[in-house]
Image (cartoon, rainbow, N blue to C red):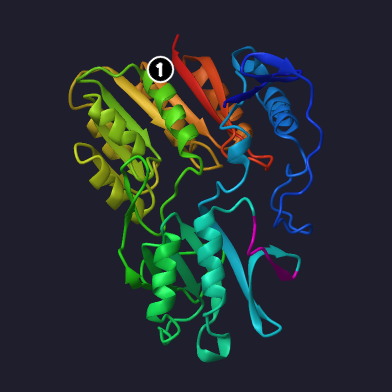
Amino acid sequence: MRVQARARGVWHNGAMSASAPTPPLPRGCEPACPGCSHRRLSLADSLRQKQDWLERRLAPWRHRLEAVRSAGEAARLGYRDKVCLSCEWRQGRWHIGLQRRDAVLAIPDCPVHSRRVREALGILLGVLPPPEHGFPLAYYVQSGAQLTLILKTPRLPGTGWLTATAWQALREAGIEGLWLHLHPCAGRRLFHRSGWHLLAGEAESVDDAGCRYGPAAFRQLIPSLHRHSLEEAGGHLAITPGDRVADLYCGNGAGLRRWTRAGAECIGVELSGDACRHAAHNAPAATVLRGTCEQRLPQLHEWAARRTARHLLYLNPPRTGLESAVTRWVSDEYRPARLAYLSCSAGTLARDLALLETGGYRVTRILPYDFFPNTHHVETLALLEEN
């Protein structure tokens, strides 16, 4: 069931209803956990708050803003299949969860985490060695079926703790690859180029859309909503064979895969080396460049100038939004006939939309998505075309 928020009330299959009563905390939820600011709100009230927030932040385009798309009540729990958790050895055991003040708040049974995350975490909590055994565990990172333990050490520790029984239990929980990543300075930057050690299983997995991904992959959390956003973007771009599509911040190539299959000639840019490798596999007909989009502007300019064809653009930048040089390239040089911009920050989206409108574009629709239920976060797809 899709639930869509409006400015007043909430739509349930086309019928207006009043706010639902405030639900109790879900079973397994740690009361002190700061992770989900909307967990005491009903779905209706959570969506309403997100809608109101977007109407304020995107006020100049309020008349283009549609209702928040949600996967429904069932998707509010058990959806987070990608996590990054802090680790701390305290009182003779590992605490794995969220950093709160000066200590890690353990959340082994977090109901927002997927079954795969909860089961894998429970198994490892029973077998991981303490720091004095050369195991300075700093972070637990899981991306779907790929699980990584980040250690603040340059030396590979012993792996006797990973018994055949423990690995079999992890496999049954849905883990396909178990990694150690050695990074003495892990913190704001979790990964660096070296330090990867595959302890067991396969080095990559395949998601519900048939795309390969690795342990450091960025993946949207609710596949049904992600598919819907790509379908809406593709419908707006209206790709025909021979069109040229630039997909900036392309991740593991889920969008590139769609655009090339529609007959477009595509180029993608992504900073993560892991994501670039998988994007090249998932969309073999596309050209994939590694680096920031600003760094790759010379190659993008050369690619766009090779032949005359209709230019289209898909954007999915980080929270910081588009680099200013990239915005200028879009408006002054590439000049796509249509573009789709998926944003995780309404603030930077508003900034970039204003700049794109100054550059000769107009916003036709804005579609919000509840990719992060129980939190205040909301992602937004903006569709634009040339004036």
Q: Is residue 107 magenta?
A: yes
Q: Amino acid at mark 1?
A: His
Q: Quadrant of the N terminus?
A: top right
User: In percent of the image, x 42 and y 32: which residue is there?
Assistant: 227
Is 331 placed left or right of 371 in the picture? Answer: left
Residue at figure coordinates x 37%, y 43% from the top left = 208
| Residue 90 within the segment the image draws in magenta | no
In the picture shown, does residue 252 fall above or below 234?
Answer: below
Residue 374 drawn above or below residue 88: above
Residue 355 position, x and y percent, is: 54, 24
Residue 236: x %, y % from top left: 40, 17
Question: Hey, which quadrant is residue 241 in on the image?
Answer: top left
In the displayed structure image, the side of residue 306 where residue 80 appears, left or right: right
For residue 296, say whether it is visible: no
Position in image of residue 14 (x %, y %):
63, 14
Q: Which residues are magenta?
A: 102-110
Q: Is residue 3 visible?
A: yes
Front in this rendered view, residue 194 or 74: 74
Q: Position of residue 99 (x, y in %)?
A: 68, 64
Residue drawn where x is 30% and y is 45% of the image: 279
Q: SS for tag 1?
A: helix
Q: Nearer the viewer, residue 44 or 308?
A: 44
Residue neighbourhood size for the residue with mark 1, other residues' Cα within 10 Å, grouped as few (<14), some (14–19), many (≥20) = some
107 and 21: which one is in front?
A: 21
Query: Relative to the observer, which residue lies in front, 2 or 188?
Result: 2
Q: Report the residue that reaches farthest toward the top.
A: 387
* Disc 1: which residue: 236
- Residue farthest along the bottom direction in this orientation: 132
